[in-house]
Amino acid sequence: MKEKVLKFGKQQSIKEDWILKDINLAIEKGEATALVGRNGSGKSTLLKIMTRILFPDTGTLKINGRVSSLLELGAGFHPDFTGLENIYMNASILGLSKKEIDTKLNDIIAFSELEEYIYQPVRIYSSGMYMRLAFSVAISVDPDILLIDEVLAVGDNAFQKKCIEKIKELKGQGKTIVIVTHDNSMVEKICDRAVWINNGEIHADGLPRDIIMQYMAFLSKEEDKRLLKNNTVNSSDSNIIDSSEELAIQSTKTGDISLVSRTGNKKAEIVDVWFSDFKGDRKQNFNTGDSIIININYRINEKTNSTVFGVGFFTSDKIYCYGTNTHIDRFKVAGDLPVEGTVLFKIDKLMLLPGVYKLDVAVHHENGEPYDYVTSAYSFQVSSDITDVGVVRLEHTWEIGD
Ligand SMILES: Nc1ncnc2c1ncn2[C@@H]1O[C@H](COP(=O)(O)OP(=O)(O)OP(=O)(O)O)[C@@H](O)[C@H]1O
Ligand SMILES: [Mg+2]
C-alpha cells in the first residue's frame, strides 16, 4: 500500500518473479538434508515455506511432526526483551506452554552458556550470543523436524562444535533435519543428502559429496569467468595482470597498478603471464591436484646470454611456498632464445591447498643481474573439497604399526 501511495501518479514498474519453481521434494523421516546454492537462489525461502511462515502461491507442503526452526538471526526475538523473556516468547511461538518452558528453562540457559547475560536485553547481544540463545530454544522444543538456516556460522568454534554434536545427537534419535549452509564441511559432517538449489529450481539432489563436488565445480567456473573478465579489463591499462581480489580492489580504488612492485634493468622483460591447464585453456581457478601451466611471455630488449627465468609462489599472507628457476633446475634452452616468446612452467599436479596464491616472476642473468622482477602481480585461486589444512597437500598414507 505504501508503495502505491508514495508512487502515486508515477510510472509503476512492478516486476513479478517466481522465486521457487517446480520444487518437488520429499524428505523422509530421519533424513538430514542440506540445501546448498548461491546467494539469492531461494534456499531461505524454501525453508520459510517449510516453517509455514511463508505460503506458496501454488503447490502444497505436507509436514508430519513438530517443527522447530532457526531462521535469520534474531527472528522471533524482541530486542528490548531480556534473554529470559525472549526464551519464553520464542519457545511459545515454537509451541511450548509456559509450564513446559519453566521446566526446560535451566537446560536452555545452560546450553546457551549465557547465564551472565540472561537478564540483559538481547539488543546488547553479539551475533554469536543471539545464535546461542536461538539454537538453545530451538532444540529445547524437542522437535521432530529441525530447520536451520545458516546461523550456525556466527558461533565461535567451540559452540559450533557443540551445535554439530547436538544436531548429530538429534539425528541419531531419528529426527529430520534440513539445514541451509555455505559451509561444505558442515554438509558432509551432518547430512546424508544434499539438494542444490539454483535460480529457484532443484538443480541436483544426491549424496553430499557428489553434490558438493558438482557445486564447487560450478562455482569455480563462475569464478573463472569473473576473473578472466577482470583480467581483460586490467590488461588494457597495463601488461601486468592482477586478478587477486585484494589487489584488484586496491588498484581500482587508487587506479594505480604501480602498487605492484617491479625492478630490473629491462634488458629482458616479462610482458605477460597467464595460467592455463594442460590443454591450454586459460584458467584462474584450479582444484588441488589439477594440472597448471604458468605461461610467461617475455621480450628480450638487449641480447644477453645465460638468461634465467624464475617463479616464486606465495600465499596471500606472504608465506613463501616455493621458488625455483631454470638455472636451479638446470634447464637449458637449445640454441638461442627467441627475442620474443613464451616460457612454460608446467605442474602436473598442483598440490597447493585452497586459497589465493600470488606469483613472483623474474627474468635475470645467471649471475643474479636483474632484468625484470615482477612481485605479487599475478595470482590464481585453488579450491578443494577436502578439508585438510595448511599450504600444501603432502602425499601420504596412514598405517597402524606393530
Ligand atoms: N520478502 C521478499 N520479497 C521479495 N523478494 C524476496 C523476499 N524474500 C526473498 N526474496 C527474493 O527471493 C530470492 C531468494 O531469496 P532467499 O533469501 O531465499 O535466497 P537464499 O538462497 O537463502 O540466499 P542466501 O544464500 O543469500 O541466504 C532473492 O532474489 C530475494 O531477493
Ligand atoms: Mg538465505
Image (cartoon, helix red, strand yellow):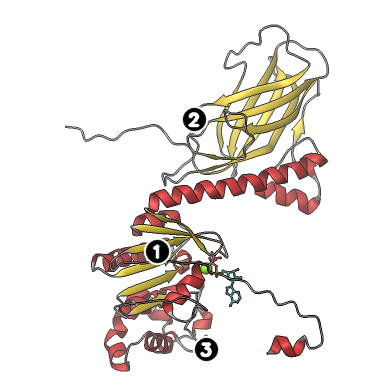
| Res 18 quadrant in image | bottom right
Side of 92 where 120 appears, left or right: right
| Res 155 quadrant in image | bottom left
Image location of residue 84, percent across then percent down:
40, 87
Q: Secondary structure at mark 2?
A: loop
Q: Amino acid at mark 2?
A: Lys
For label 3, the residue is 80
Q: Tell which circle, 1 or 2, labels the residue nearer the N-terminal end.
A: 1
Q: Secondary structure at mark 3?
A: loop
Q: CA distance from mark 3 to mark 2?
A: 56 Å
Quarter holding the N terminus? bottom right
Nearer the observer, disc 1 or disc 2? Answer: 2
Alpha-carbon neighbours of circle 2 within 10 Å: few (<14), some, or many (≥20)? few
For label 1, the residue is 160
Image location of residue 323, percent across then percent down:
58, 27
For label 2, the residue is 349
Residue at 53% in and 82% down: 123
Q: Amino acid at mark 3?
A: Asp
Q: Tell which circle, 1 or 3, labels the residue nearer the N-terminal end.
A: 3
Q: CA distance from mark 1 to mark 3?
A: 26 Å
- Which sits in the foreground, 348 or 166? 348
Q: Is residue 325 visible?
A: yes
Quarter holding the C terminus? top left
